[in-house]
Amino acid sequence: MNLVLSVGVIKRLREHTALLSATGVPSQPALTIGDAVDAFATTTVNGESVSYEDVTAETLVGFFTPGCGPCEKRLPEFVAYARTLPGGRDRVLATVVASDPAEAAGYVAELGQVARVVLEDSTGVATRAFRVSAYPTVLMVAPDPDGRVLVTADRIRLDRAVVAAA
């Protein structure tokens, strides 16, 4: 009996492994604290150029994709948090990852209130520069003294408003 159960469990694990490997998730890990962002240059949905060199101070960066349950939950939190940041839209960069612009319209509209918004597919410039492998991804980045853009926080508590220094 144990042998039959073991064979069944092993078969099921192989099926799950095959399903997970077929999801197409990039193998390269997402950036973590201290990692450098790759150089990038892209255009927002409003036609504004945005690049690596534009990150001149601490900047909130978010990646969202329509149809993602966790993204739908975190999107309003991201927008509310971004509203509390000093520097306004210039210190917030949001990327909506979608192959169909119509599908992304709601996300773009909501994020556009508080951020510079880039719309691209999963192989886009910003997605590659930040090595995004899961959604949503929310990071804080800032330039170091040498001009490299580094991740300064990778676990942002979006449920807490930013408190300005006195």
Image (cartoon, grey):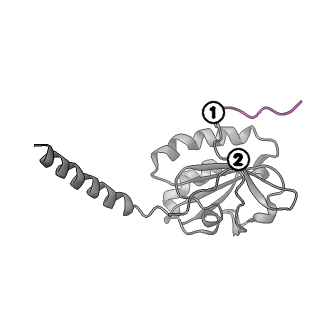
Work out which quarter of the rendered image holds the N terminus and state it: top left
Q: Earlier in the sequence, mark 2 or mark 1?
A: 2
Left-right relation of 101 to 117? left
Which sits in the foreground, 164 or 88? 164
Magenta extent: 159-166
Residue in front for this viewpoint, 87 or 33: 33
What x and y, as percent, mark residue 126?
Answer: 64, 64
Q: Is residue 142 left or right of residue 154?
A: right
Q: Position of residue 4 (x, y in %)?
A: 12, 48
Total labels: the figure holds 2
Query: Which SS class for mark 1?
Result: loop
SS for callout 2 = loop
Name the quadrant of the C terminus: top right
Residue wearing tag 2:
114
Is 85 in the magenta?
no
Mark 1 is on which residue type?
Answer: Asp
Q: In the image, residue 55 lies at what x, y percent? A: 79, 58
Q: Distance of mark 2 from mark 1, alpha carbons?
A: 16 Å
Q: Which residue is mark 1?
A: 159
Give, as a three-letter code, the residue at label 2: Val
Q: Residue 147, percent across and down?
A: 84, 62
In the displayed structure, 28 sits above or below 111; it is below
